Image (cartoon, helix red, strand yellow):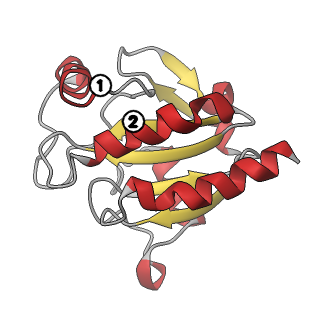
Amino acid sequence: MSIYQFEVDTIKGEKRTLKQFENKVLLIVNTASNCGFTPQYKELQELYEEFGDQDFTVLGFPCNQFMGQEPGNNSDIENFCEVNYGVSFPMFSKIDVNGEKAHPLFVYLASHAPGLLGSKAIKWNFTKFLVNNKGEVVKRFSPNTNPSEIKPDIEDLLKEVRV
């Protein structure tokens, strides 16, 4: 199983596979519009702008599983992200990241990059997964990790792409 085989719905409801991101370094994030970490959208967008032309992208997956902090529909979420943070990186339909209805992508990510003490559950909004250009999950970052702190890891993976 490869990360590229997962089917996802864009924020506009179009079915796609992650194959469209093959050979790119990815930062996959579960997001929310009403969370204390929501301002991280700004830094995620900055990473996307800085490295987007170097085979890197951010993928945002809204989730309402943590205290109802993503209550809107896909259109509301898309509008919020564009108006408040200028988000232009790919956003996807709202999903669950934990439990029986968890999207298979996040089950895969969590099992390949467990959290603290081996936990596979996603603890909160803005958990981030770094994936190399071969589709391998490299690292999990906690919601407390500012996206700018991930920059050195992204740069290292992009150097590998160029070799």
**Residue beneath label 1, please?**
86
Asked whether 103 or 87 is in front, the reply is 87
> Residue visible at 17% across and 39% down?
33
Q: Does residue 30 appear to the left or right of 157 in the view shown?
A: left
The residue tagged 2 is 45
As displayed, is residue 101 above or below residue 148? Answer: above
- Seen from this angle, which residue lies furthest bottom? 117
Query: Which corner quadrant of the image does residue 145 belong to?
Result: bottom left
Q: Is residue 61 left or right of residue 162?
A: left
41 shown above or below 150 = above
Q: Position of residue 149 (x, y in %)?
A: 44, 62
Residue 120 visible here: yes
Residue drawn at 60 percent across, 60 percent down: 153
Query: Is disc 1 placed on a helix, strand or loop?
Result: loop
Q: Could you tell me the amino acid type at mark 1? A: Gly
Q: Nearer the viewer, residue 65 or 69?
A: 69
| Coordinates of residue 78 in the picture (x, y in percent) | 26, 22
Q: Residue at x 76, y 46 (%)?
A: 134
Contact between marks 1 and 2 (CB within 8 A): the answer is: yes
Q: Is residue 136 visible?
A: no
- What residue appears at the point 55 percent right and 21 percent down from the top-left corner? 16
Q: Is residue 105 left or right of residue 121?
A: right
Q: Amino acid at mark 2?
A: Gln
Within 10 angstroms of label 1, few (less than 14), some, or many (20 or more) residues? some
Label 2 secondary element: helix
Q: Earlier in the sequence, mark 1 or mark 2?
A: 2
Residue 76: image location, x then y, percent: 16, 21
